[in-house]
Each structure stands twice: as C-alpha cells, then as structure tokens.
Amino acid sequence: MLFQLFCAVLLPVFFSTASAAYPDRPIRLIAPFAPGGNIDITARTVAPGLTEQLGQTVVVENRGGAGGRIGTEVVAKSAPDGYTMLLGSSGSLTVNPAFAVVPSYDPIKDFAPTSLVSIVPLVLVTHPSLPVANAREFIALAKAKPGTVMMASAGTGSNTHLTGELFQVITGVKLTHVPYKGSGPALVDLMGGQTHCIFDQVSTSTPYVSAGKLRAIAVASIKRSPLLASVPTMDESGVRGFEASTYTGVFLPSATPKDIVNRVYTALLKVLDQPSTRDAFTRLGADVIKSTPEELTKRMVGDLAKWKKVQQQTGIKLD
C-alpha cells in the first residue's frame, strides 16, 4: 500500500520538482553499438551541440551487443528523469523487435521520441580479394558456391544483418552470417580478410572504399548516394525495388515528464539546424531529417509492420 501511494502521489511530485531544474548534471546518450559505426558517429556528431544547448555535458556511452538490444533496453529501463537518452536507430527500434521471439522492450510504448536525426542508405561492400565487381557478379558467385561467402554484420538482429537476410531471400543466394558487436569491429575484420562482405552504412564504409581497402558493389537506396556517385543502386543492378537505410532519432524513457522531453526536442532541433551539423552529416553521406515526435512514431509504426511482414516471409526468429 505504501509503495502504491509513493508511485501514485509522491513519485510524480518528485519528477515534477526535478524537471523544473533540468538539467543540473551530465547526461548520458546511449549509443547501443560499438565505437566506430554509424550509430556511434551520429551520437558523437550531435552530442557537442546538445551539450551547448542544454548547458550540461552530454556524454556518449557505447553499450553494444545483441544487434543494439542491450543498450536500447538499458534506456527503456532507466529512470525517466531525462539524464539517460538513446540514440535509437531503425535497426534497434523496428527491425530487431520485429524478429525477436520475446521482445525485451516495446519500441512504441517504452520510449518518448523527440525528433529524427538523420537517414543514411546501406551499401554492399566486399573485400577487394573477392573476385566480383558488381551485384550481378556477386550474386553469381554466391549461387555458384553456396555458403562460402561470409557476410559480416553489426550483430544478430541488426539492420545490417537482416538487410542481408532480405537480400538472400530476394536473390536466392546463400551467405554465411558472421555477427559482430557493431559495424566498427565488423569492418576491421572485413578489411583484414576474415570475412567477405557486409551491408553497411554508406557513412562508415565510404572512407575505406576511397582508400581502396573495400570495394563498393551496390547501394541499397532508390537513388545513388552522392558519396558513391559512380556506384549503381541495387535496383539498377537488377535487384528490383530493393531498398534499405538506417534512420536515427533521440529517445527518452516513456515516463519522462513532457517538459523534459520538449526541452530535449527543442535543443535537438536547434542542433540539427546548425550549418556545422548539417555539413558533418553531408560528409558522412547522411541526410538530416527533422521531425515531430508524432511523425517519428508514425514512421516507426510503419517500419515495424514492414519488417514483421519480412519476418513472416523468412521465418527468422531472434532469441
């Protein structure tokens, strides 16, 4: 009875009082993947601006593993006081839950969205030693030698993993999946020749493609990427209608007071309006896309429905 009284009466008063002084200490921005990948880079791109706008240090904390589920769950279960935020992605918030046998969080009910941050297409890249120069040759090789082409990913259930699974369903090839704790370490091993390919974000792969350490085969977007203008899309390469991208946004636990959510939302919009922020994302091959919380929720609901349909078609389930 006393606990129920605390939750019903005293807890709202506590958070109301706390939110009036928000923020008065450093804030954690959880990036649920390992350092070096797209999500980590995105978090570190917006964190300095949020620090400036909120007047408190925003510290990026990497909590990788399980395709983004570990770090995402940390935020879902954190105190709703505005001091733990999530740099969420389509992979961890819509793709992964759609394939989970028992989801450890509800992406719609457990989070308070603020705004979208960016969207970046995926690209199929290979180690230069793989004897293919385009998507048709890649598909032909994979069909000729089923299971011998090793596909790295940012983790089981990540967007990079399930995009690869969708590619296999559509093209009829068989790849061997090799999961990592983030695209950063996956790219390191790919460049070292331990694996053969990955569906990675254009933003993180392009520097290695430019340096000749990786080969870009096809971009998984309807239009070509400005960063890889000479690289055809999957659709152009014969894989009709194939599209995969990663979008990101900033989220807080669902019970966070609305005035705190609005404070973060307003600060984030100002950060995304800064020319320096937009220039940074452009160099990464990403488009800055602002949204209202309602628009972000609508996008997530539609994305969940899409990936649940893919789950039904493939039968893939994640523990």
Image (spheres, rainbow, N blue to C red):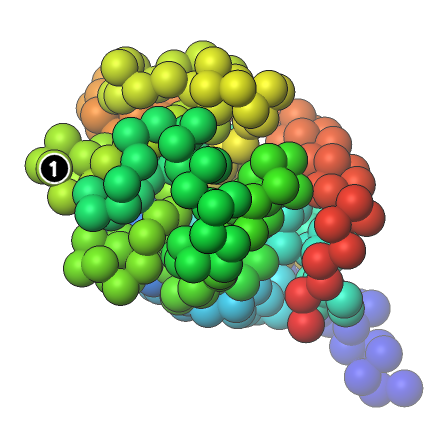
Residue at point 20%, 53% (across, down): 191
Residue 294 horizontal/vertical position (percent): 69, 29
Residue 45, x across and y down, in percent: 27, 40
Compare residues 145 and 241 and report the one nearer the observer: 145
User: Horizontal and vertical percent for residue 107?
Assistant: 69, 51
Residue 128 in the image, given as x and y percentages of width and height:
20, 43
Question: Is residue 75 or residue 144 the one in the foreground?
Answer: 144
The one nearer the camera, 245 or 118, is 245
Task: Point out the image quarter for the C terminus.
Answer: bottom right
For residue 241, above or below residue 179:
above
Q: Which residue is mark 1?
A: 212
Q: What amino acid type is highlighted by mark number 1?
A: Gly
Q: Quadrant of the image for the N terminus?
A: bottom right
Name the foreground residue: 116 vs 153.
Answer: 153
Q: Is residue 7 above or below residue 17?
A: below
Is residue 281 visible in the rendered image? The answer is: no
Question: Hey, which quadrant is residue 242 in on the image?
Answer: top right
Q: Residue at x 64, y 35 (%)?
A: 170
Residue that lies at the very extreme toward the bottom in this rendered image: 2
Q: Residue at (48%, 46%) from the top-left corner? A: 144
Q: Quadrant of residue 208?
A: top left
Left or right: where does residue 104 sit relative to residue 276?
right
Q: Secondary structure at mark 1?
A: loop
